[in-house]
Structures are given as C-alpha cells and as structure tokens.
Image (tube, grey):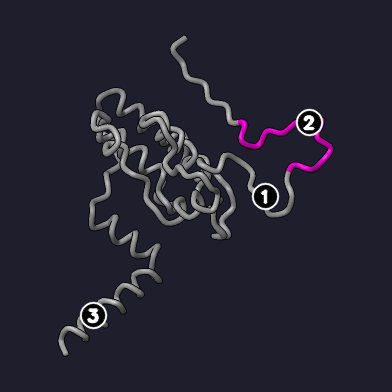
C-alpha cells in the first residue's frame, strides 16, 4: 500500500528463555539507534526525546543506507554517539534535500532540549517539507558545530592548548 512500517525488535527475546531479560549492566535495544542519554551515564531517563533521537536515526538510515554511527564494537559506537556528530547525510548523498537533512540532524541532536519536542512536531515538520513549505528548523553552522564539539571534548581541547603553548614557547626561545 506504499506505506512503510517500522518494527523494533531490539529488545525482543525468546519467551522460552528461562533467564531474565538482561543481566546487570547489559544494554537493551539496538545500539546503533541509542540516544546519547542512553549510551552514557548522563542520569537522564528515557522519554519522548529518546524516541525522537531513535526516529532521527531511522530517518538517517533510510536516507543514506546506514546508521549514523557504524562500528564493529559496542564501546566505539557508544563513544561516537556521545562525542561525534553524525556525518551530514548530504555528504554521503548530495541529492538529499537540505531541509530533510536539517530535520534529520535536529532529531539527532546530542542535547534532548535541542531536538523536536514530540513525534507530532516531527510529523508536522515533515508535512511542511512534503508540502513544499518552509520548515521551522534551521541548520547549524560550522562555528556552532565547532563550539559544540569543543564543549563535548573539553579535556582533549585543553591538552591541545597545552601542546600549542609548549610549541609556541619552544619556537619563541
């Protein structure tokens, strides 16, 4: 009927399995679609903003044919979810609409309060896109992207600053 259906079996298990759902410390869900608050120890509980992130990850996969953070091992996926921005879809496929990329990346924001507030808001935004209307979300610029990266990687930036100061001091002597 020209409709896509999405079913998540990320937490499915065999009912005949006599053990519990998980052992202490196990991760529930499809790791490639976990939000930063699920992948880290932020203390935030799952909520509608978590689902918005997962929706963005599914949209990303639908657009470019892979999840936002591919890797072969779980720790690397978690690190990338927490620290790296996903590669913009248009870098992988330039034919993707800039507005659709913006909607997708807004869903995948690291901070929950920067994402859409609800699935209904995402649906309305996608409706505007499909109707050829202007979307409400705005793409973030390079400077904002750099500021966010620095905020997430403070220790690395501090170490880099120390190295630069040492090199400048050594060259200046």
Whether residue 3 sits left or right of residue 44 in the image: it is left
- Classify mark 2: helix, strand or loop: loop
- Mark 1 touching mark 3, by CB under 8 A? no
Q: Nearer the viewer, residue 140 or 66?
A: 66
Q: Magenta region's main secondary structure?
A: loop
- Classify mark 1: helix, strand or loop: loop
The residue positioned 40% from the left and 48% from the top of the image is 109
Q: Give above or below for 84 relative to 90.
A: below
**Residue located farthest toward the right when viewing the structure as drawn:** 18
- Crowding at dot 3, Cα within 10 Å, few <14 / some 14-19 / many 20+, comes out as few
Numbered disc in front, either 1 or 3: 3
- Crowding at dot 1, Cα within 10 Å, few <14 / some 14-19 / many 20+, comes out as few
x then y, percent, for residue 31: 55, 43
The magenta span reads 9-21
Q: Which residue is mark 3?
A: 167
The residues bearing labels 1 and 3 have C-alpha atoms spaced at a distance of 44 Å
Of mark 2 and mark 3, the one earlier in the sequence is: 2
- Crowding at dot 2, Cα within 10 Å, few <14 / some 14-19 / many 20+, comes out as few
x then y, percent, for residue 8: 58, 31
The residue positioned 27% from the left and 44% from the top of the image is 138
């Amino acid at each position: 009927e020209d409709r896509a259906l999405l079913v998540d079996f990320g937490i499915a298990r065999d009912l005949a399995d006599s053990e519990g759902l998980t052992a202490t410390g196990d991760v529930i869900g499809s790791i490639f679609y976990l939000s930063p608050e699920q992948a880290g120890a932020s203390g935030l509980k799952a909520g509608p903003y978590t689902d918005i992130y997962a929706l963005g990850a599914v949209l990303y996969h639908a657009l470019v044919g892979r999840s936002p953070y591919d890797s072969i091992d779980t720790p690397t996926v978690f690190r990338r979810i927490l620290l790296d921005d996903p590669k913009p879809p248009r870098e992988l496929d330039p034919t993707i609409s800039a507005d659709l990329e913006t909607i997708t990346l807004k869903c995948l924001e690291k901070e929950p309060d920067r994402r859409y507030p609800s699935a209904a808001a995402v649906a309305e935004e996608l409706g505007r896109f499909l109707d050829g209307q202007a979307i409400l979300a705005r793409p973030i610029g390079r400077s904002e992207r750099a500021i966010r990266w620095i905020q997430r990687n403070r220790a690395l930036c501090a170490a880099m600053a120390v190295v630069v100061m040492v090199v400048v001091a050594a060259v200046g002597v």
